[in-house]
């Protein structure tokens, strides 16, 4: 069988059957070894037990590897993004056995994984024995090896769309690979009816209870903000709510007032953060006044973070499917916040949009509770906005992030006038 290493490159070909046969005599004959009577007879039992455990673990490892082995049909951008995401995990859940495409990929990152053309798919599947075949063909009008895919499916190999698998793997959606029809026909998007009513009830109840419990904390923070620096206690900024309707988002002020109308990104304003502000931002206590926004009906407890109204217009033009983001109430916390952190440019906002779109599609009470639990952990550990947070868990290196940006071919801030994007800390 083919053995693949954790990053998916093929290393060597070995046969596991002789190894199993070699262990069998020790397992079967362990009890019959001619050992002297007395205290040494227990060695036969130990040998039998150890050999049995080793053989079970050996077989279990082979079964686990088979269930993790992926074969990718197609070598376009979607295939590249999948491989990058799998490789970026420190402990990959899957291994890429190879790529099948009519032409050998020109991308050096994945060219060594090419196993052959699509008309050889049946033979490749028999040799590789993958658990899944991921269809990542960009242009399906040229046709797919349907007979080979069907044969593989009826023989127990899962055949799955690469976009759907990417969503399950990463907790975000591949915006560049999505077609409007895929979203229209997709299951999910439970943003009305019972799901919406449940989310609203939970948000209101939690906001009322939260305000009652933390009212002494709110009063203390307000006093500290006032004593620490000149200016108002609360910072009010116009944000875009559901369907783009503007509202005034409330926060405790964490920066010294600035009349120069400078950028509002964290990286450009660290010199303005007050002493109290550093702690408030680190533990996200500056967000607590937004419980009032929840009671007003402007926000839910969980949802996409609201953008400033000026940025809302820009993002609608520049980020694919951004209008879908406005179909739900914004939230005090959200899936993108706990998975990615804070964004500092249009490129990073596009990356966060992938997570927001995933949340809107898969929204449920269970997912909301998970987000709230992780938000509490984030607050307790002080992973707030005292500094720009790191990338999502699966994006462990700057190199991988750079490759994704290059592959996505998105518009970057450097390609736009500086005034076109009103910058803000969220």
Image (spheres, rainbow, N blue to C red):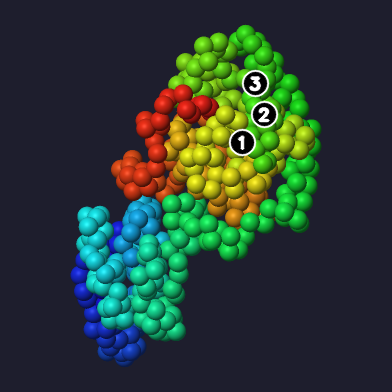
Among the 4 quarters of the image, the one containing residue 416: top left
> What residue is rendered at 48% in x and 35% in y?
343
Which callout, 2 or 1, points at the residue further toward the start of the chain?
2
Q: Classify the position of the C terminus by image quarter.
A: top right
- Left or right, 325 with reference to 262: right
Give the x, y percent position of residue 175: 47, 51
Q: Is residue 175 visible?
A: yes
* Badge 2 density bin: few <14, some 14–19, many ≥20, Cα 10 Å: many
The reply to whether callout 2 and callout 1 are in contact (CB within 8 Å) is: yes
* Badge 1 density bin: few <14, some 14–19, many ≥20, Cα 10 Å: many
Give the camera-side residue of 186 and 95.
186
Q: Classify the position of the N terminus by image quarter.
A: bottom left
For residue 206, above or below residue 83: above
> What residue is rendered at 26% in x and 73% in y?
117
Q: Mark 2 points at which residue?
A: 249
For residue 44, above or below residue 261: below
Which callout, 1 or 3, points at the residue further toward the start of the chain?
3
Q: Disc 3 on helix, strand or loop?
A: strand
Give the x, y percent position of residue 271: 47, 16
Give the x, y percent position of residue 190: 67, 57
Q: Name the residue under label 1.
A: 306
Q: Which of the numbered marks, if any, corresponds to residue 235?
A: 3
Give the x, y percent position of residue 246: 68, 32
CA separation in Å, label 1 and label 3: 15 Å
Q: Which of the numbered marks, if any, corresponds to residue 114?
A: none
CA separation in Å, label 2 and label 1: 9 Å
> What residue is rendered at 39% in x and 42% in y?
410
């Amino acid at each position: 069988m083919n053995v693949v290493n954790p990053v998916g490159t093929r290393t060597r070909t070995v046969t596991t059957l002789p190894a199993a046969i070699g262990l069998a005599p020790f397992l079967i004959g362990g009890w019959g070894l001619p050992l002297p009577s007395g205290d040494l007879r227990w060695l036969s039992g130990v040998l039998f037990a150890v050999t049995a455990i080793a053989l079970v673990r050996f077989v279990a490892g082979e079964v686990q590897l088979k269930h993790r082995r992926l074969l990718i049909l197609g070598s376009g951008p979607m295939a590249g993004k999948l491989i990058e995401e799998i490789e970026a995990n420190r402990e990959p859940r899957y291994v890429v056995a190879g790529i099948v495409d009519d032409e050998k990929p020109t991308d050096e990152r994945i060219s060594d994984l090419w196993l052959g053309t699509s008309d050889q798919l049946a033979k490749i599947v028999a040799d590789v024995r993958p658990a899944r075949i991921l269809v990542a063909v960009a242009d399906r009008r040229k046709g797919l090896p349907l007979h080979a895919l069907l044969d593989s499916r009826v023989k127990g190999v899962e055949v799955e769309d690469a976009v759907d698998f990417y969503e399950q793997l990463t907790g975000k959606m591949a915006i560049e690979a999505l077609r409007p029809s895929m979203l229209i026909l997709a299951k999910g998007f439970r943003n009305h009816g019972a799901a919406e009513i449940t989310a609203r009830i939970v948000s209101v109840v939690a906001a009322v209870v939260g305000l009652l419990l933390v009212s002494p904390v709110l009063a203390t923070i307000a006093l500290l903000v006032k004593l620490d620096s000149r200016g108002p206690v609360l910072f009010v900024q116009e944000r875009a709510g559901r369907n783009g309707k503007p509202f005034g988002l409330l926060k405790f002020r964490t920066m010294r007032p600035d009349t120069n109308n400078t950028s509002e990104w964290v990286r450009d304003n660290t010199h303005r953060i007050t002493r109290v502000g550093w702690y408030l931002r680190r533990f996200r206590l500056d967000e607590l006044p937004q419980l009032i926004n929840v009671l007003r009906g402007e926000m839910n407890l969980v949802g996409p973070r609201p953008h400033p109204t000026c940025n809302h217009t820009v993002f609608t033009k520049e980020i694919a499917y951004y209008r879908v983001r406005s179909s739900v109430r914004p939230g005090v916390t959200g899936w993108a916040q706990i998975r990615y952190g804070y964004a500092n440019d249009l490129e990073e906002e596009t990356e966060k949009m992938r997570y927001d779109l995933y949340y809107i599609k898969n929204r449920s009470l269970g997912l909301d509770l998970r987000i709230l639990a992780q938000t509490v952990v984030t607050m307790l550990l002080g992973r707030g906005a005292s500094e720009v947070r790191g990338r999502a868990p699966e994006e462990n290196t700057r190199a991988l992030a750079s490759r994704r940006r290059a592959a996505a071919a998105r518009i970057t801030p450097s390609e736009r006038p500086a005034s076109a994007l009103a910058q803000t800390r969220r």
